[in-house]
Image (spheres, grey):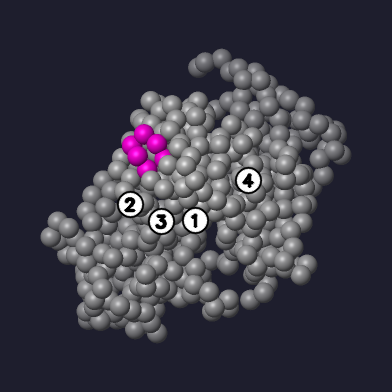
Amino acid sequence: MAASIPSLTLLVGKLGELPVGAVVTVNPTGLAPISVFHTEEGLFAIDDTCTHQDASLADGWVEGCTVECPLHESCFDLRTGAASGPPAKRAVRTHRVEVRGDDIVLTPSTDS
Amino acid sequence: MTGSVAVVGASLAGLSAVRALRARGFHGTVTLIGDEPDLPYERPALSKEFLHTGEPTGLLEDHSETARLDAQWLLGRRAIGLTPGMGRPIEQEGEAAPHAEPHLIHLDDGRTVSADTLILATGARPRRLPGVPGAHYLRNLDDARRLRETLYETKQLVIIGAGFIGAEVASSARGLGVDVTLVDSAPIPSAAALGETIAAACADLHARNGVRLLTGTRIESVRPDAVHLIGGARLAADTIVIGIGATPNIEWAGDRNPLLHNADGFETDTQGRTAIPGIYAIGDCARVHDPISGRDTRSEHWNAAITQAQTVAAAITGTPPPARTAPYFWSHQYGKLLQLAGDPTAATDLRIIDGALDGESFTARYEHNGTPVAVCALDNPRLFTRQRKQLDRDLTSAH
């Protein structure tokens, strides 16, 4: 069994600075941009770039636990990253995000 | 739900129809006929990133999607005729009438495909400018490959027609370092699609990116090495691209079906039904009658192809149609994203709600006596999407 690589955690910001409905995008070194969405359902973090074409999901439309790409209306489940159908073919990667005190902490996934 | 459906045209509209039929529980036979040898691909990319990368993007997810769709693919075959059968009555939508005489599609290889239901999705072809041998047109993958190879050896490119295809090719060619001149007969290109103010702002993008735009021009003649304008100007060109609109592919269905089409598309109602029961039309070849406005519209936009496909699949399967949404299209030029939703032609006023028309980004709302009827944005997808969703909601609540 290979030794596990310790996870990198990132401080995204203060919970008080990210109200429900807001989204923030972070650019971790060496990784694709990640967007953290604060929805009615809680905090979710996914890769920011639509898997269909180069568009930022942070600019998209959020309803419930779904974000719709602003370019071609591909929908992704914020909880699982799954694409709900064409035109996107692949899921976006999801990442662990949690609140510690008033800090929003992101643990980027490096799974391919 | 069983029966048989044949889809003529295997690009975005046709493929989307097959997807929507299966998603809506149609378990019958589906045949997809396409005149190109390739599996469906992203056509919008051909005037944009493809000219740089040379890599087409397939529309199908993977083999598992192909298996799920469970369709018979007849690619590289052209439909050359249509014999309407005794289509099933419209009242029995969703239920194939027993012993109904099927519709027949005749192919160029001598085969005939028969089906209870036909979906015509044969698209459009570039309008040709006579007397310009060697000029490039851009519609399919072969066209794009030829143009890409040529562009790499082109010093001076002249594009006739400054609509979206012309503008996108200009942008892509400029990105390759080519000297580009765009000519258009209109005083403001794309004014019909965007309204004059926004169209003028978009036209400015060309000059801002080193592309010459000549408007209100009349072409006298085209030689292999130059375009001559009325008034005497000569535009040297080692490559000429023509993008002056498209003509729907409807002739193949024959003039024995006078109910099927006029000169500009297969005529349908809002559900995509032609006058012949069991025959539908979608995408660039369809001309949709809107009873509310009284207008007939043929849309060549990507988004309309998908929505229309879902609409006819709903009609065929007797399932709820998709929600009405505002017409939408986008364009990429010079690294910028232009988006438009709604109907700018209905506007009495234009309000700039963000940015500036001569700036890096703007968002403009078209209003009719204070009511938003359209929105256009350059490089502001977030605000644009919010405005667009409001237009969609207004449409839904209006009916």
Q: Looking at the image, can residue A53 be seen?
A: yes
The disc labelled 1 sits on which kind of residue? His
Cα distance in 3D space between marks 3 and 2: 14 Å
Q: Residues within 10 Å of mark 4 (few under 14, many from 20)?
A: many
Tags 1 and 4 touching, CB below 8 Å? no
Instruction: From the image, state whether disc 4 or disc 2 is nearer to you.
Output: 2
Name the N-terminal-most of marks 1 and 4. 4
Q: Quadrant of residue B398?
A: bottom right
Instruction: From the image, state whether disc 3 or disc 2 is nearer to you.
Output: 2
- Image: magenta residue range: B222-227
Left or right: B207 in relation to B108: right
Viewer-proximal residue, B146 or B103?
A: B146
**The magenta stretch spans residue A55:** no
Q: Quadrant of residue B253?
A: bottom left
Q: Which residue corresponds to the image point at 60% horizontal and 17% vertical from the top-left?
A: A5
Q: Is residue B171 above or below residue B385?
A: above
Q: Kindly identify which residue carries mark 3.
A: B246
Cα distance in 3D space between marks 1 and 3: 12 Å
Q: Kindly identify which residue carries mark 1.
A: B301
Instruction: From the image, state whether disc 1 or disc 4 is nearer to you.
Output: 4
Q: Kindly identify which residue carries mark 4.
A: B202
Asked which secondary structure carries label 4, the reply is helix
Name the N-terminal-most of marks 1 and 3. 3
Name the N-terminal-most of marks 3 and 2. 2
Q: Kindly identify which residue carries mark 2.
A: B130
Q: Position of residue B194 (x, y in %)?
A: 61, 55
Q: Which residue corresponds to the image point at 38% horizontal and 31% vertical from the top-left?
A: B238
Instruction: From the image, state whether disc 1 or disc 3 is nearer to you.
Output: 3
